[in-house]
Amino acid sequence: MPEPPVIETLVLQPTPFCNIACSYCYLPNRNDRSVMTHETIEATFVRVFDSGWCAPELNVIWHAGEPLVMPVAWYRDAFDRIAGMAPAGLRLRHAVQTNGMLISPAWCELFRTYDVGVGVSLDGPAALHDRHRLTRGGKGTFARTMDGIRLLQSHGVDFHVISVLTAESLGDPDGMLRFFQDAGIDQICFNVEESEGAHESSLFAEAGLRNRFAAFLDRFWRAARTAGTVRFIREIDAMLPRIVRPDEIDMRNEQVVPFGMVNVAANGDVSSFSPELLGLRDARYADFIVGNVHTHTLPEMLAGRSMQRLWRDIATGVERCRATCEYFSVCGGGAPVNKLTENGGFDSDRTRFCELTQMVPTDLILDALERIDPVLQQIDDPSSASHGRAPCQTSAA
Ligand code: SF4
């Protein structure tokens, strides 16, 4: 009898619409202006709470479009409704991943009032950021994103950035660190520009990318620790507790178990596993939709054909990983969406994405541990950083 699901993360799509048009965007429906109704929000939480599968701590991430195109009052209403429905004792935290352009004092007040985790997409200095992160009219977005970041800072809102690394930024770790330091940004997540959904990355296919990223991360990590100005580098600080952990604590990869992550589209359609699957099309898997919150309970979705087929193929891929990969104990079987997009199927193992996100950081940390490298001693308590509460676990930026 399989274990019942444990829902730790709920990704909600308030709208698929995005106000800008980044050149590397993977979202297929970013012109779709439909919005999630409060009936859909309530139906979602009824399904989640009635299932009995909710973990004691639930992260609710508003994402998969630009979440701040919805009004502040819409979130205030949504957060209050959800709080009114939550079972006693549940620790629930909201988070948004935003391009930062629409941040205003009213947003900052909402973030502070409801203790919302905030991630801002920022690719480095203007010359790098504006190469890909463009308005719909083709203009750079750096200035407005930085205005948003300065508002967060002046209002005392804690935030991290997700920075997409391109060929140019990979070659300049010192310049990237200088930029973040000058901007007062001290929590950083990196995503190497990848091929996903509608976007093909030429960088991702390049031979030698693994070594280039390893050199970047090693240099950035050392320089950041020496400077003492960066509190959190996701690739290092989120990986450390997975490597250095008591034997009895299993590695849990919420992307490879049914409803470890529950991803809900604006119309109530539900997918699971990698959140990036929401909105992708594939007839073999019913477009990755396992049900709709208005018509199905979560147990019905779990038992349905779509979920069972996804789970079977994803589980086959995990078993291949377990049998072949020496990084399995820290990775737990990878990201299904990357197996599908890179290898053509979930029932596969190694990807370029896992080389960069799992193997490179693990190798750097193990190497530092072996040499009792001082770079490790400058970390007081990696688990105290805010990353556990931040929407960094998707590769979306
Ligand atoms: S690192 Fe790659 S090959 Fe290894 S377990 Fe993870 S996904 Fe599988």
Image: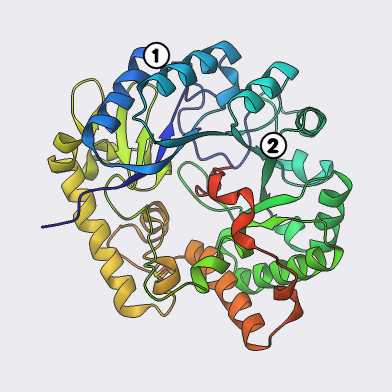
Question: Seen in the image, is 153 located left or right of residue 310?
Answer: right
Q: Position of residue 374 (x, y in %)?
A: 76, 79
Q: Position of residue 364 (x, y in %)?
A: 63, 76
Ligand 1 image position (quadrant): bottom left
Q: Residue at x 89, y 47 (%)?
A: 182
Q: Nearer the viewer, mark 1 or mark 2?
A: 1
Residue at the outermost front position: 88
Location of the C terminus (image quadrant):
top right
Q: Which residue is mark 1?
A: 38
Separation of disc 1 and disc 2 at Cα?
Answer: 31 Å
Whether residue 334 is situated above or below residue 112 in the rendered picture: below
Q: Position of residue 239 (x, y in %)?
A: 55, 65
Q: Residue at x 48, y 21 (%)?
A: 79
Whether residue 58 is situated above or below residue 256 in the rendered picture: above
Q: Residue at x 36, y 72 (%)?
A: 248
Question: Seen in the image, is 335 located left or right of residue 24?
Answer: left
Q: Amino acid at mark 1?
A: His
